[in-house]
Amino acid sequence: MKNLLFLTLSILLPTASLNSTIYETTEIEALVPLIKEELQKEPGPCAIVAVDLDNTTLKAGNPKATDEWFSEKIKEYTAQGLTSDQAVARIMPEHLQAHRTTKVTPVDVDVKPLIDALQHKNVHVIALTARNLDFVNISLRQLHDIKIDLTPKGHTNGAIERWELCYKLGGLPKDAYYIPGIIFASGNDKGMVFEHFLRQLKYRPHLVIFVDDSANNIKAVDQMCKRLGIKKCACFMLTKVKQGISPESGKRFNQKEL
């Protein structure tokens, strides 16, 4: 199947599934046409947009606060004979300290206006991060620094109470948690964590959109949508950071597009 050019510098890579599609893109605005169709439905959108934090929503200035540094250290210590858990235990204090003090910038200057516009249109927007509970205050501070607020806004078609609560998502290798607006996957398979979250809320959206910089996470959420029979699922692998593209580059988001 030929690749289809979609927006500036964006490549769409359709899967074989009729209701699930995986895209590779450098522009977060690539999701706009898909969500726009859902916004036109009555009585309103039944959709959830989930975005990763690191290298998708925000980028840390301190190298020791990046996924790349963390992954390289894991490889280094496991090569020396440590288990993955032992390597994480050795790395985490330095990684956490770097996160507490690092400055962060948005991966794309359009992340905030796009999230604001989706929330204004009554679309659930949450973060789905591999981070664990140690990162709650750090994550809230970092999102605040780039002026993004993911706490429920009082819409959600009468189900706001469930979205305002905190949840422990058990039944996984490691406990994951939902703090209003953010799912902390604690290193678990993001698809399994997302599934536990939706079951906890007893919420079955018609449309799931997921944005992440990891192919493994994209595939995990795509598989979740298939397991749950989600009517439409679109997973976007955002490669802006990987390709070294500046936050200001590419097509600018216009709220009138929604």
Image: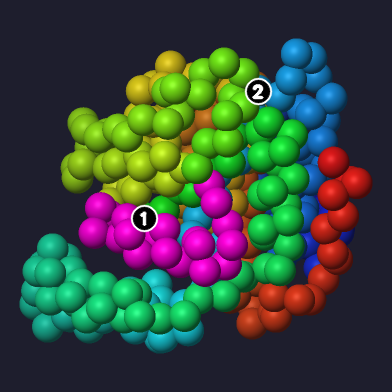
Residue drawn at the location 67% of the way across and 58% of the way down: 112
Q: Gap in Å between the C-alphas at discs 1 and 2?
A: 25 Å
Instruction: Classify mark 2: residues with Cα within 10 Å, few (<14), some (14-19) or many (20+).
Output: many
Task: State which tag comes first along the sequence, 1 or 2.
Answer: 2
Question: Can you say whether 43 is above or below 251 in the image?
Answer: above
Tell me residue 56's x, y (percent).
56, 63
Q: In this image, 185 relative to 224: left or right?
A: left
Tell me residue 208's x, y (percent).
60, 34
Within the magenta stretch, is there residue 240? no
Circle 1: element type: loop
In depth, the one of 37 and 254 nearer the eye is 254
Pointer 2 residue: 46
Q: Residue furthest front?
A: 154
Residue drawn at the location 73% of the way across and 56% of the way down: 113
Pointer 1 residue: 130
Provide the residue span drawn in magenta: 131-150
Which amino acid is tagged 1?
Ala
Tell me residue 7's x, y (percent).
86, 59
Q: In this image, 178 relative to 229: left or right?
A: left
